[in-house]
Image (spheres, rainbow, N blue to C red):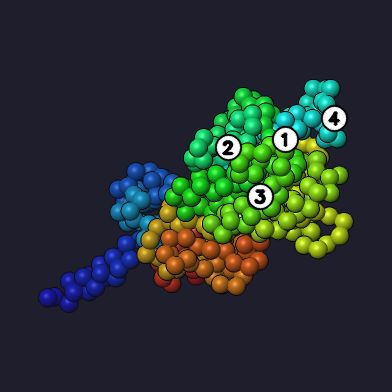
Amino acid sequence: MHRAAFVRVLLLLSLVGCGFAPVSRAGTTGMAGSGTGAAGTTGAAGAGGAGGKVSGGGGQAAASGDVVLTGAGGAAGMSCGQATVPIMPLPPDVLIVQDRSLSMAQDSNGKACTATGCSKWSQVSTAIETVVSSATGANVNWGLVFFGADSACGVAPNGTAIVDVAPAATSAPAIQAAFMNTQPQSYTPTEAAMNSAVTYMQTLTDQNPKFILLATDGLPNCPPGGNTTADDSTGAETAVTNAVAAGFKTFVVGIATASDQMATTTLNTMAINGAEPQPSCPPGTAGCTQYYSVTDTASLETALNNIIGLVASCTISLKDAPKGFNNIVISATDATTGKPVAIPQDPVNGWSYDATMANVILNGTSCANLQNLTYTAFNFNYACAGVVICIDQPCPTTN
């Protein structure tokens, strides 16, 4: 082969070794992509790159600070330059097990309700509807089941796994409708309700974390056998223990129960057995309750929002992230600064892969930052080996 031709071959091979390559870095004006992809195709796929957006080959001229990839263009071509894909924590499935006993029609002092909106039922429904409809509540797959299911001690018919609203990301309207179409009319078969809730939760096959939230206004009754006046505290406490053993930690909310010492003792035990007592009141602490004690709409909304933070999943799905990249950075937006921050790959206080490598797990302080909403808007930033990934603006200029 002629020497000049041989040199041209070597040059061509060096150019195709990695599909695409960044031809401009932050702080410079990128050139239009030279390939055949549709305008902006690759840019759309890589939108949101924390270190400057990615512009597709064959696309429009990039703005100052863009990373431009040259070559064949199109989404399939993003193989070397930095790109970003948003990733989301797995939303937990939370089933609200809501007491609809006749006492819920009373006010918070146990008296007949004489004004519109004064009943515990009205206050609870308002608080739950507000929270599950909010932006924060949208991070949870909320479900709902009332107990009892009749005017006595029944729950789901024949103990079958039936709920009023199945846990889902879009369940808020159905939950609102369920409260509007339901009124207090039963006793308090807490043991049977918890057992039925566990049976139902075991039918869910998604990989999302799962919890039960029990909300009640008094002592459990209706032990097996249907005696409506018999105390069933022991049975209810055991049912919560069994729920945790089945994999479903349980939050306990007591509605206007603080003045009833027997109810407080039972609900405290249930909260401890449920493995989710109030963090601000460790077991044995005087002057507070291990369960979430609420008296009105505002205090219940506060309790529910606190619980949302505790159930927030530290497992982040990679189903939308590309496969086969080893040069990656997991980042989030820090609410205290409004800027992106890199989360270190660290099994103690950063992130690590789960056993399947289909998810990343946030550990230690990183998990706490997700749960207290310090970290939001998570991203999977990736590039070929040797490419420096920049998640902040402006990216350092490289020569």
Q: Mark 3 and 2 residues: CB-CB less than 8 Å, in contact?
A: no
For badge 1, the amino acid type reads: Val
- Please tell me which of labels 2 and 1 falls first in the chain: 1
Disc 4 vs disc 2: which is toward the camera?
2
Comparing 180 with 223, the one in front is 223
Quadrant assignment, res 394: bottom right
Question: Distance from label 3 to label 4 (Cα)?
Answer: 26 Å
SS state under label 2? loop
Residue 13 in the image: state x and y as whole percent.
Answer: 25, 69
Q: Mark 3 and 1 residues: CB-CB less than 8 Å, in contact?
A: no
SS state under label 4? loop
Residue wearing tag 4: 111
Q: Is residue 251 visible?
A: no
Could you tell me which residue is drawn at 77 percent across and 36 percent down? Answer: 297
Q: On screen, 71 above or below 355?
A: above
Could you tell me which residue is drawn at 83 percent across and 34 percent down? Answer: 110
**Mark 4 neighbour class, 10 Å CA radius: few under 14, some 14 to 19, many 20 or more:** few
Q: Mark 1 and 4 residues: CB-CB less than 8 Å, in contact?
A: no
Question: Distance from label 3 to label 1 (Cα)?
Answer: 21 Å
Comparing 172 with 113, the one in front is 113
Could you tell whether 251 is left or right of 299 in the image?
Answer: left
- Please tell me which of labels 1 and 4 falls first in the chain: 4
Could you tell me which residue is drawn at 81 percent across and 63 percent down? Answer: 284
Disc 3 vs disc 1: which is toward the camera?
3
Comparing 160 with 60, the one in front is 160
Residue wearing tag 3: 236
- Please tell me which of labels 3 and 1 falls first in the chain: 1
Q: Which mark is residue 124?
A: 1
Quadrant location, the N terminus: bottom left
